[in-house]
Amino acid sequence: MTKNICVIGLGYIGLPTAVMFANSGVHVHGVDINERAVNMISNKQLHIEENGLQERLEQAIDEGFFTVSTTPVEADVYIVAVPSPINPDNTANLEYIRQATASIVPHLTPGVLVILESTVPPKTVENVMLPELRKSNLTLGEDLFVSHSPERVIPGKIFEELVNNDRIVGGITPESAEMTKALYKTFVQGEIHLTDATTAELVKVMENTYRDVNIAFANELAKIAETIGVDIWEAIRFANFHPRVNIHTPGPGVGGHCIAVDPWFLVELSPENADIIHKARLTNDAMPQFVAQKAKNILNDMQITNGKVTVLGLAFKGDVDDMRESPSVKVIEALQALDIEVASYDPHIKHVQHPTQVTTMEEATQDADILILTTDHTVFKQLSPSTLTTKEPKPFILDTKNALDKNKWQQAGFHYLKLGDGSPVGVMS
């Protein structure tokens, strides 16, 4: 049994991973440079939202298997799970990876295993981590073992998927991969597949890029459907009855730290060969503007000059509190660029994190000309339209996620429109 693990980065991946190991009887020390997050965790409070995390955190701390601080400690295994965002020019920012790796070097002892979980461009382990780790004077493959095992989980189901999903492990050496596999077998029930580090890096980026390209295809289909009188959601549903077809769904854009970011790693890595990947990224990044222009067209049709739009949802996906790369925020920015007043509301974002954010549904909807649903939270799906405080006559509602019951909203007097719906009832200018 591994004596102890030090997890660097206690965000949406690092904290659940640390707690999972601790719940499995492994001593874990978590590290984050965010003092507020460390203080909250040490008091058994959460700075992120994830199903089952509160109970698991309390168990880990109460049983004495989990401690936290802002600095690393000596350990047998280090797991690096820090952000790997993109810069404003869409190039990879790997400084967090480099800094996290440098922070553990003074604590490395012979036989140590270092694992990168963050999703990164191929060659990051070789080109960013290894130069820092070599400063320990440990010999790679003899008394220093390094691997990449990217997370493959979805917010809201992290613990279920940590256990059940297959896992990819890429070692700098075969022994590094085997050591990492043995470690994750502590709780992983899915199969663990071994390869080299660069292949593992590419595999994770490929997985998210596939989804981005598929979504871009769906978004293009949505635009086409609006011009030919078809509901694209219905058409996609029929197409997916084909045993070899799996078209994703359109939406107001693509968010989250993975799908909206990772394809740019490949574009940067080989721009001359990433034509489809690049085009898909541009297509999805343009969807917030497409949605905002629809709202502007509606206001123009109603001859409203100084209209107000309410955006329902700030998180990048339903039933989470994660706003990273959220298309909702970009929809708001695009609306404001069109001189439209905007209010936003999200029941999962507990503290005000955006200048347009209001704290109650009533405040959000009471004087809006258009409601735009951008996040398919369950609470929004279950809304009773007749109970909303709104203008009379009722405002337009633009559903970008196909999350609402059209008949229910129309019966309540709302003008219901849906992204990608060009059928006669849902035709949009």
Image (tube, rainbow, N blue to C red):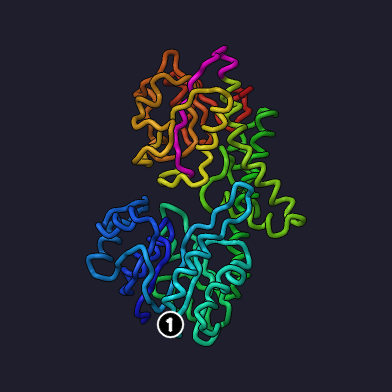
Q: Which residues are magenta?
A: 299-316
Residue 330: image quadrant is top right
What's the amino acid at mark 1? Thr
Residue visible at 44% across and 17% down? 394
Q: Find residue 319 and report its horizontal and vertical position in percent.
A: 41, 45
Residue 13 forms part of the magenta stretch: no
Q: Find residue 389 and report its horizontal and vertical position in percent.
A: 36, 21
Q: Secondary structure at mark 1?
A: loop
User: Toward the viewer: 416 or 156?
Assistant: 156
Which residue is tagged 1? 109
Residue visible at 25% across and 57% down? 43
Q: Quadrant of the N terminus?
A: bottom left
In the displayed structure, does residue 283 sit left or right of residue 385? Answer: right
Asked if residue 369 is positioned above or below residue 2 in the image, the reply reads above
Residue 359: image quadrant is top left
Asked if residue 89 is positioned above or below residue 376 in the image, the reply reads below
Q: Find residue 68 and report its horizontal and vertical position in percent.
A: 32, 64
User: Toward the viewer: 209 or 132?
Assistant: 132
Q: Is residue 159 visible?
A: no
Q: How many marks?
A: 1
